[in-house]
Amino acid sequence: MKNTKFSVVLNGLVTENPTFVLMLGMCPTLGTTSSALNGLGMGVATTFVLIGSNTVVSMAKNIIPDKVRIPCFIVIIATFVTLFEMLMKAYVPALYASLGLFIPLIVVNCIVLARAESFASKHPVFDSALDGLGIGLGFTMALTLLGCVRELLGTGKLFGQIIYPEQYGTLVFVLAPGAFITLGYLIAAINRLKRKQA
Amino acid sequence: MIYFTIFIAAVFVNNIVLSQFLGICPFLGVSKKIETAVGMGGAVAFVLTLSTIITWLIQTYVLVPLNLEFLQTIMFILLIAGLVQLVEIVLKKISPGLYQALGVYLPLISTNCCILGVAILVIQKQFNLMESTVFAFSTAIGFSFALILFAGIREQLSHMNIPKAMQGTPVALVVAGLLSLAFMGFSGIVK
């Protein structure tokens, strides 16, 4: 029994990793990963929303009429996003400022709605919460990895710790083009690894 | 003059896709052919301008006077989702031709983050109604411009011999990166 619960989490982390496999939620992935810390923050915020919305959607799945389920899901998701937005504003204002627009935009992050529709509306409450946790962790991992690579190549730092002098960094990796290029090569590298295993 | 500055800034300097990272999903999803890119661009231009005007009015005349700004996210997303549905129904009745052309793309738009993004951006930038409308329309032009350019490149790319691991999304992302690098050349034209 424990095994299947664990596999639900693992599924989100590896098999259905939202960024590297499903390719969902690209906007925050590219937009917020200029440093490892920002990537981590965005990942945690999305995880929180995912767990919350998955749990509530799963609890309410028998009450919500089938025809209006998408608007209902969106309202549930938007509620959690607003909640987290207020919490962040109060406790981590610096992170809130640097993530900016992308916090309210979690509402339109395709992963959150996709999990509500494809998993939470068909599974029991506890499993749905675990699925939210797994997908959220997978997303966090991908964002942090992308943030680490960009921060290291761009500024020579990792989580703000200096690894090598900044003048050797390539600034373009912190700017917009670096986001696209880094993610492209990361996905290519993962494709390559997967093909070797198979 | 200020409208012209807003236009240039939104289309070239702060291009919504290539430097603000909004609307990446349709940018990667429907950019395999120039034809579909044009259709999507048209649909986005239509909905984006309309939704920005409506959300601006709601924010200024309903949410702010009632001190309900914290409901912004929920309110805006519901308005946009409702608006998309409404536009779909109205278009079907009034102009079947346009509906045929834009029809497939309309439902996809409510999950396009650039719509909600722009609605929130104009509030943050404290634009007035006219400026917001111009900003929304120019942003949509910028989106279509980037989308069509990208589609053109991808059509050529499909004839190329690309390493297996790079095929599909990875190579598209790298191309988008190079395109974004080219657009960085515009920075500094307007502040």
Image (spheres, coloured by chain):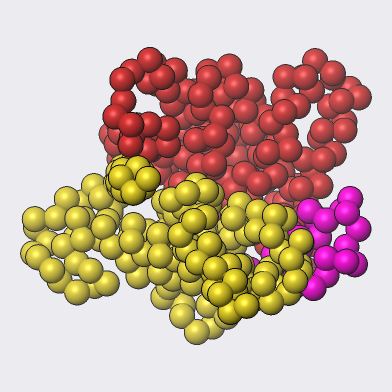
Chain colours: A yellow, B red
Secondary structure mostly seen in magenta is: helix
- Residue B110 placement: quadrant: top right
| Vertical comparison of B16 with B66: above or below | above
Q: Which residues are magenta?
A: A59-83
Q: Is residue B179 magenta?
A: no
Asked whether residue B96 is in view, the answer is yes
Which residue occupies the foreground of this view, A92 or A2? A2
Residue B75: x and y in percent read 75, 60
| Vertical comparison of A8 with B139: above or below | below
Which residue occupies the foreground of this view, A7 or B136? A7
Q: Quadrant of the N terminus of chain A?
A: bottom right
Q: Which residue is depicted at the point 31% across and 20% down? A: B161
Q: Which residue is depicted at the point 17% across and 50% down? A: A170
Residue projecting furthest to the bottom = A91
Q: Which residue is depicted at the point 77% across and 19% down? A: B100
Which residue occupies the foreground of this view, B141 or A87? A87
Residue B70: x and y in percent read 68, 71
- Would residue A36 be found to the left or right of residue A95 on screen? left
| Vertical comparison of B160 with A158: above or below | above
- Would residue B87 be found to the left or right of residue B119 on screen? right
Q: Quadrant of the C terminus of chain A?
A: top left
- Would residue B48 be found to the left or right of residue B145 on screen? right
Asked whether residue B122 is in view, the answer is no
Q: Is residue A64 magenta?
A: yes
Residue B42: x and y in percent read 64, 26
| Vertical comparison of A131 with A175: above or below | below
